[in-house]
Image (cartoon, rainbow, N blue to C red):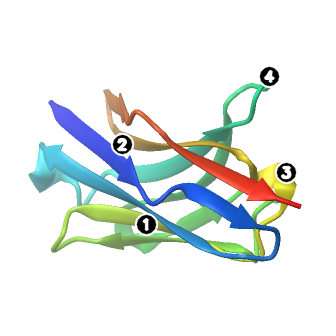
């Protein structure tokens, strides 16, 4: 069993920055080889992929966030981060952390990010 707890969301003006954190507990020995991702869901829209980081630190980004968001993983703290810069109103959404490893698939509860214009 894996538990994911996101934090760091909030209200920020357009052009500002936020750093989200996702703390992993439970099956932490798998954290190093799991693919950790950030997804987001805006009001009235489907959940969409934002970024992920796999084994070996390989990062993948959605085109909409590429160049503005950076995902990273701290193995000592069992935490994955999403640094978000140059935020836009269209980045407003609930951001979810995801843990994937073979047939294991866990989600956090989400953290709200609101970007005002």
Q: Which mark is residue 44?
A: 4
* Viewer-side residue, 10 vs 101: 10
Q: Which mark is residue 90?
A: 3
Q: Secondary structure at mark 4?
A: loop
Q: Residues within 10 Å of mark 3 (few under 14, many from 20)?
A: few
The answer to whether residue 14 is left or right of residue 112 is right
Depth-wise, is mark 3 or mark 1 nearer the camera?
Answer: 3
Q: Secondary structure at mark 1?
A: strand
The answer to whether residue 47 is left or right of residue 23 is right
Is tag 3's residue or tag 1's residue first in the polypeptide sequence?
1
Q: Which mark is residue 99?
A: 2
Give the Cα distance between marks 4 and 1.
26 Å
Tell me which residue sits at (89%, 61%) in the image.
117
Q: Residues within 10 Å of mark 1 (few under 14, many from 20)?
A: many
Q: What x and y, as percent, mark residue 101?
A: 32, 40
Give the Cα distance between marks 2 and 4.
24 Å
């Amino acid at each position: 069993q894996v538990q994911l707890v996101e934090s760091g969301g909030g209200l920020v003006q357009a052009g500002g920055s936020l750093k989200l954190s996702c703390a992993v507990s439970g099956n932490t020995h798998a954290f190093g080889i799991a693919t950790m991702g950030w997804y987001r869901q805006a009001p009235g829209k489907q959940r969409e992929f934002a970024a992920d980081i796999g084994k070996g630190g390989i990062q993948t980004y959605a085109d909409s966030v590429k160049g503005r968001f950076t995902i990273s993983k701290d193995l000592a703290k069992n935490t994955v981060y999403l640094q978000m810069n140059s935020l836009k109103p269209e980045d407003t959404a609930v951001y979810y952390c995801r843990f994937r490893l073979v047939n294991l698939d866990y989600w956090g509860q989400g953290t709200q990010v609101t970007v005002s214009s």
